[in-house]
Image: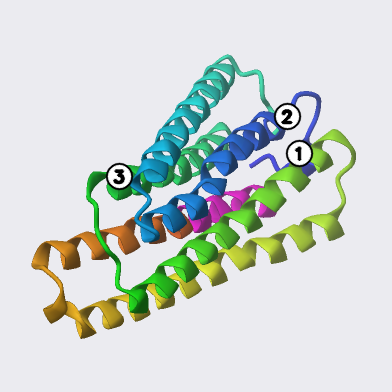
Amino acid sequence: MKTIGGVLGRSPFGPLHEHMMKVNDCLKMLKPLMESFLEQDYRKVADKAGRISKLEHEADMIKGIIKKSLSRSLFVSVERADILACLKEQDRIADSCEDVAKLLEMRKTEVPPVLQESLLKLTDKVMKAVEAVREVSKELKNLAESSYNRSKLDKLLKTLELAARREWEADEIQLDFAKKLFGIETKLTPVSVFFLINISREVGAIADHAENVADCLNRIISGR
């Protein structure tokens, strides 16, 4: 497998990072969206959900351009399959942001205070998981444009480990949320319980996709 050390001429990491930045634009809307939902400001929820959908569409457009470029063999620095796998998981981050947005827009639901802190903590944690892979994406772009340095790549591998750790931490927050939710389930309607569990699951999926991006980047850097 060709690795970063074999970068010659055109590299896929610039376009891949461009896509990641558009995905990150979706992600940056996630916490304001969640805060508006918890505040029951459904006008703002609808507005932010619409903006996320627009950004997700823009990310799709970038993804399409990259895939067409790859099909014409413009990028030769790494295996095409690895780039496509990474692109797919980055795209799923944006998709999951849109899924959360549509879900929060779907139903007006009062969230008990005991659950609000956990939802906000979960939102923060998944954003930090994506932050780790975004930083590596940026550094890979910079390395591809300058020079290959093994020590720098080893540092990036350490950063990628953060994504996996934060995904695990997100799972723990989801578990805590579920315990708190079922502790007060008799005070809620069955539909509300089901709805809130789905929200936590959709938010948590963002960290899952971030970990998958980290795995793809790890393979590229390690040459496995």
**Label number found at residue 11:** 2
112 or 135: nearer the eye? Answer: 112
Residue 95 visible to the viewer: no
- List the residue tagged with mark 1: 141
Q: Is residue 80 above or below residue 211?
A: above
Q: Nearer the viewer, mark 3 or mark 2?
A: 3
Chain-order first, disc 3 or disc 2: 2
Residue drawn at point x = 46 percent, y = 28 percent: 54
Chain-order first, disc 2 or disc 1: 2
Residue drawn at point x = 82 percent, y = 40 percent: 142
In the rendered image, residue 214 lying in the magenta stretch gets the answer: yes
Q: Nearer the viewer, mark 2 or mark 1?
A: 1
Residue 29 as seen in the image, left or right of residue 148 = left
Q: Are discs 1 and 3 less than 8 Å apart at CB?
A: no
Q: Nearer the viewer, mark 1 or mark 3?
A: 3
Estimate the spatial distance between the alpha carbons at disc 1 and disc 3, rounded to whole Å.
Answer: 36 Å
So how many labels did they put on this image?
3
Q: x and y percent of residue 95 in the render? A: 40, 40
Q: Identify residue type, mark 3.
A: Glu
Judging from the image, what secondary structure is the residue with disc 3 in? Answer: helix
Q: Which stretch is magenta?
A: 209-224
Estimate the spatial distance between the alpha carbons at disc 3 and disc 2, rounded to whole Å.
Answer: 40 Å
- List the residue tagged with mark 3: 105
